[in-house]
Image (cartoon, grey):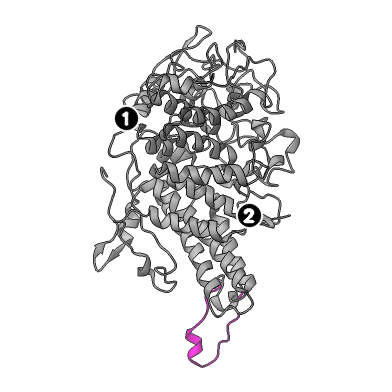
C-alpha cells in the first residue's frame, strides 16, 4: 500500500489578466488555491490531505511544539511524568505551564487554539467542496467517503480543544463561511460532546474497515475514537460495547514486543488502529517528520539527534513508578487517587550530581518493570543500539532538570539516515501511534471496573502485564520482574484498588505519550495526585543505593488549584478577536 504523503500546504499558481475591465479588481491571491481550480476529485482530495497534514501539530503558523500531537507540554510536563528540562529560563512559557502559573497571554495556549481551529477549518473546506455541485467527476460514494474522513478529522481537532479548554465553540460546515470571518465567532456556552460524537459516528458508519493508503482513517479508528469520547464522559456501557467490537472484530492485536509500538521499522503494525504518519526525505522542503518534538533530544553530539536541546525529561517519580514488589506487581495502594502508593518512598538509584567519568552504582538488582527502559534513558543501561547511556554528558543541565532522557521517539543508530531528516536528525519518521489495541484493552479494563466486573478488568490488565513480561527487554543485565495480578486480586481488594491498578497500568504503558494530565483530570484525581507529586519531587531524594541528592527544587511551593487547573485559560487574543458588535463571544474559563 502506498503511504499517505502529508502535504503541508496547497499552492496553486493563478494567472492574472491585467485588462481594462472590472475583472482587474478581482485578482486571485498569489500562493492560494482558488475553489474553482480545486473543483474536481483531485482538488477535493488535496483539501482532505491538507486537513490530515495538521495531525502532527505542525503547519498552523506557530512553532509546532505548541500544538504537536504528542502534547508533551500540556499533557506531559503538567502530569508528574516529566519536567520541562533544559536550563532555567529556556522557553519560560513552558516553565509557567509546568508550574501551574497559567496566564491567558501565554503563546503556547494561543498556538494550540489556532492549530485546533485551523484543522477544523480545513476539514470543513474539504466537506464543503466534496458536497459541491461544482465537482462533477466524483461518485456519491467517493463524496461520502471524503466527508466521513473529514468528519473524523473534525472530531479529532474538536476533541483536542475540548480536553484543553472544556467549553469551546463547535464549528461545522453549516456555520463556517469561507468569505465571512464573523461566521465562526460562535459562543463557547455549550457542551460539544454530542457534536464530537456525531462526527465520529458518521465516520464509523461510512468509512471502510481498511484503507488503501496508510494514514487514512478507517471505521475501526472512528469507533475507537468514539469510545474514547464516551470514556471521557463516563459513559461506561456505551464505551464498552464499542471497544468490545473493536477488540473482537477489527483484526488488531497486541504486538509480541512492547517496543514494536515505538520504532520506525514497525510503523503501522498489527497493534496500531490509527497513526499520525511522519515522513522524511520525501522531497518536502518543510518541517516534516516529528518536527513538533525536535527540542526533546539529548544534549550531546554523540547521542540520537546529535546535540540539542534537552527538553521534556522523565521525572524521578515516573522512574520510581516502574519499581515492582516481591510479587512483580506495582507498588500501589488501595486509594483510587494514588496517594496511598508506596513506590515513591525510596528512589531508584540515579547519577544525579555525578559526571560521566565518576563511579556510579546503578544497582541492577533493583526489580523494575521492563517497560521502564523502553521509556526512559538512564545511566548504565543500554540506550537502543547506541551503547550505555552515559548520564551527565547527555543532559544539558542535570542539576536543574535531572538525570533522565525520554526514549520512545528516539531512533536507532542503525536507522540514522533512513529514519532521519537529511538536514535535521531530530526530525524522524517514527510515527505517533494515536490509537492502538493496548489503549482499547486498558479502556475496557476501566469500563469493567466502573461497571463492577472486577474479574474481567483484571483479565484485561493482565493481558498488558503478560506482554510486558514476555516481550523484549532492553538490557539483559537489569533485574526485570513483572507479573500478572493473581486471580481475584481486584475483587478481594475492592473497587478503589482496582481503579488505581488500571490507572497505574495506563501510566506504565503510555508514559511520556502526552495523555497523563488529561486522564488525571477526567478521573477527578488531579488535585491530590499532582500536589503530592509537586511536594515530593521538589524535596531532596534518597535512593536505594543510599545516596541523598537534590531533586527539582524549583517546584517547591507550586500547586495545582482545584476548580481552576482542570482546564487551561482561553487565549486572550482569541477572546479579543471574537468580538461581534463590540462584545466578545468567547467567555474565559473560571479562575483566569
Q: Residue at x 49, y 11 (%)?
A: 543
Magenta-colored stretch includes residue 14? yes
Left/right placement of residue 365 relative to residue 179 reads: right
Quadrant for the N terminus, please: bottom right
Residue 335 showing in the rendered view: yes
Q: Is residue 79 magenta?
A: no
The residue at the far top in this view is 546
Spot occupied by residue 400 in the image (x, y as percentages of width and height): 46, 25
Considering depth in this image, is 249 or 51 the residue closer to the camera?
249
Residue 139 percent location from the top left of the image: 62, 74
Q: x, y (%) of residue 77?
A: 45, 34
Q: Is residue 380 left or right of residue 515?
A: right
Q: Which residue is mark 2?
A: 209
Q: Secondary structure at mark 1?
A: loop
Q: CA distance from mark 2 to mark 1?
A: 46 Å
Residue 559: mark in rendering: 1
Amino acid at each position: 500500500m502506498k503511504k499517505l504523503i502529508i502535504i503541508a500546504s496547497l499552492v496553486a499558481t493563478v494567472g492574472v489578466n491585467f485588462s481594462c475591465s472590472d475583472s482587474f479588481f478581482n485578482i486571485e491571491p498569489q500562493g492560494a488555491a482558488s475553489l474553482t481550480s480545486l473543483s474536481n476529485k483531485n482538488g477535493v482530495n488535496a483539501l482532505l490531505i491538507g486537513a490530515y497534514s495538521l495531525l502532527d501539530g505542525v503547519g498552523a503558523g506557530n512553532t509546532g511544539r505548541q500544538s504537536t500531537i504528542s502534547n508533551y507540554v500540556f499533557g506531559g510536563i503538567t502530569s508528574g511524568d516529566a519536567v520541562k528540562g533544559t536550563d532555567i529560563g529556556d522557553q519560560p512559557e513552558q516553565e509557567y505551564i509546568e508550574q501551574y502559573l497559567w496566564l491567558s497571554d501565554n503563546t503556547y495556549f494561543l498556538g494550540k487554539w489556532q492549530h485546533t481551529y485551523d484543522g477544523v477549518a480545513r476539514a470543513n473546506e474539504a466537506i464543503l467542496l466534496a458536497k459541491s455541485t461544482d465537482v462533477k467527476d466524483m461518485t456519491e460514494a467517493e463524496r461520502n467517503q471524503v466527508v466521513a474522513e473529514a468528519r473524523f478529522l473534525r472530531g479529532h481537532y474538536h476533541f483536542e480543544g475540548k480536553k484543553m479548554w472544556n467549553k469551546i465553540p463547535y464549528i461545522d460546515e453549516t456555520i463556517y463561511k469561507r468569505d465571512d470571518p464573523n461566521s465562526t465567532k460562535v459562543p463557547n456556552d455549550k457542551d460539544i460532546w454530542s457534536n464530537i460524537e456525531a462526527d465520529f459516528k458518521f465516520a464509523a458508519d461510512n468509512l471502510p474497515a481498511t484503507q488503501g493508503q496508510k494514514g487514512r482513517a478507517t471505521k475501526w479508528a472512528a469507533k475507537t475514537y468514539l469510545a474514547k469520547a464516551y470514556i471521557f464522559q463516563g459513559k461506561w456501557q456505551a464505551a464498552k460495547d464499542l471497544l468490545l467490537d473493536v477488540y473482537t472484530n477489527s483484526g488488531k492485536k497486541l504486538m509480541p514486543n512492547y517496543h514494536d509500538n515505538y520504532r520506525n521499522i514497525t510503523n503501522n503494525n498489527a497493534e496500531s488502529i490509527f497513526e499520525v504518519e511522519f515522513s522524511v526525505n520525501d522531497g518536502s522542503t518543510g518541517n516534516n517528520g516529528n518536527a513538533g518534538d525536535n527540542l526533546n533530544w539529548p544534549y550531546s553530539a554523540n547521542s540520537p539527534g546529535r546535540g540539542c536541546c534537552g527538553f521534556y525529561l522523565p521525572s524521578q517519580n515516573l522512574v520510581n513508578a516502574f519499581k515492582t514488589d516481591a510479587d512483580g506487581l506495582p507498588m500501589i495502594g488501595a486509594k483510587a487517587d494514588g496517594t496511598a502508593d508506596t513506590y515513591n518512598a525510596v528512589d531508584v538509584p540515579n547519577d544525579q550530581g555525578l559526571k560521566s567519568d565518576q563511579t556510579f552504582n546503578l544497582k541492577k538488582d533493583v526489580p523494575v518493570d521492563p517497560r521502564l527502559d523502553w521509556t526512559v534513558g538512564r545511566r548504565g543501561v543500554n540506550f537502543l543500539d547506541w551503547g550505555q547511556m552515559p548520564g551527565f554528558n547527555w543532559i544539558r543541565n542535570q542539576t536543574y532538570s535531572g538525570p533522565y532522557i525520554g526514549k520512545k521517539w528516539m531512533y536507532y543508530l542503525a536507522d540514522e539516515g533512513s529514519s532521519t531528516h537529511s538536514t535535521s536528525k531530530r526530525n524522524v519518521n517514527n510515527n505517533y501511534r494515536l490509537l492502538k489495541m493496548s489503549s482499547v484493552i486498558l479502556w475496557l479494563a476501566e469500563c469493567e471496573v466502573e461497571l463492577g466486573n472486577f474479574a474481567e478488568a483484571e483479565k484485561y490488565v493482565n493481558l498488558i502485564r503478560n506482554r510486558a513480561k514476555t516481550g523484549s527487554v532492553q538490557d539483559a543485565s537489569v533485574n526485570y520482574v513483572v507479573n500478572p495480578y493473581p486471580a481475584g486480586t481486584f475483587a478481594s481488594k475492592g473497587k478503589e484498588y482496582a481503579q488505581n491498578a488500571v490507572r497505574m497500568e495506563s501510566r506504565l504503558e503510555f508514559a511520556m505519550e502526552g495523555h497523563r494530565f488529561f486522564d488525571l483530570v477526567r478521573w477527578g484525581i488531579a488535585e491530590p495526585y499532582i500536589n503530592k507529586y509537586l511536594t515530593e519531587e521538589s524535596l531532596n531524594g534518597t535512593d536505594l543505593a543510599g545516596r541523598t541528592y537534590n531533586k527539582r527544587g524549583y517546584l517547591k511551593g507550586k500547586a495545582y488549584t482545584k476548580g481552576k487547573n482542570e482546564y487551561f485559560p482561553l487565549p486572550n487574543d482569541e477572546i479579543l478577536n471574537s468580538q461581534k458588535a463590540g462584545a466578545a463571544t468567547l467567555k474565559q474559563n473560571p479562575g483566569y
